[in-house]
Amino acid sequence: MAVNGEAASQAGAAGAAGALSLPAPQGSSLVERGSLGGFQLTPVARKADPLDLVALAEEVQKADDFVRANACNRLTVIAEQIRYLQEQARKVLQDAAKNADLHHVACNFVKRPGNVYYLYRRKSGQRYFSILSPKEWGPSCPSEFLGAYRLQHDMSWTPSEDIEKREAELNVLEKLLSQQAALPPCTEPNFQGLTM
């Protein structure tokens, strides 16, 4: 009985040792060259030499160049957006100054949004708004006509030559708002069917 137990323990020890270093079966290596299980293995000649410091440095430099180029491209887009936003900010400030200036023009009546008012300048240089157009004044117009403006509901002024364009923009925005309100809630805006 001890002999069988001793043989079993020796076999177990031999098995444990054999698991660490089993000889390869005859006619087969552990890693075959060429195709293994349908996958093409990379030939040794195509592998980079890890000791080739020049090649490694070139790869690092190439990666740095790509990272720098990618960052520059993204920063270029951001710079263009900044220029666009600066231009928009400049336009907003100009419009605000123009609107404030027109609100300070002399006027002897209550201005109502949606109406067109006519801007004149007296010989003294004073500017004033009138509800009479140059056509209504006729040849007896006492002042120099400077322009016609519509007072919008947001209290901004639109020159008469831009009224149709402004109305088209407001109609598109109104259409957008009404379509958004009619749709079920979603995470993205719906611009379907909107054209200028």
Image (cartoon, rainbow, N blue to C red):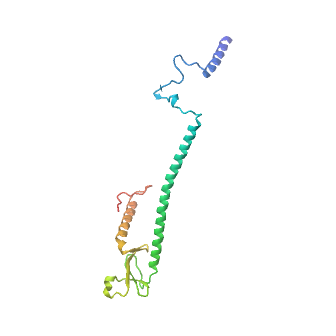
Instruction: Name the residue nearer the viewer: 81 or 36.
Output: 81
From the viewer's perspective, is residue 53 above or below residue 154?
A: above
Position of residue 66 measured from the top left corner of the image (x, y, whole percent): 52, 46
From the viewer's perspective, is residue 186 above or below residue 98?
A: above
As drawn, is 173 to the left or to the right of 59? left
Instruction: Name the residue nearer the viewer: 115 or 179.
Output: 115
As drawn, is 81 to the left or to the right of 148? right
Position of residue 140 measured from the top left corner of the image (x, y, whole percent): 33, 88
Q: Quadrant of the C terminus?
A: bottom left
Position of residue 46 measured from the top left corner of the image (x, y, whole percent): 51, 31
Position of residue 44 measured from the top left corner of the image (x, y, whole percent): 52, 28
Farthest residue in the front direction?
54
From the viewer's perspective, is residue 172 above or below residue 108?
A: above
Instruction: Name the residue nearer the viewer: 70 or 20.
Output: 70
Number of numbered discs: 0
- Residue at position x 53%, y 43% from top? 62
- Residue at position x 55%, y 41% from top? 58
From the viewer's perspective, is residue 40 above or below residue 104?
A: above
Image quadrant assignment for residue 22? top right
Instruction: Name the residue nearer the viewer: 161 or 195.
Output: 161
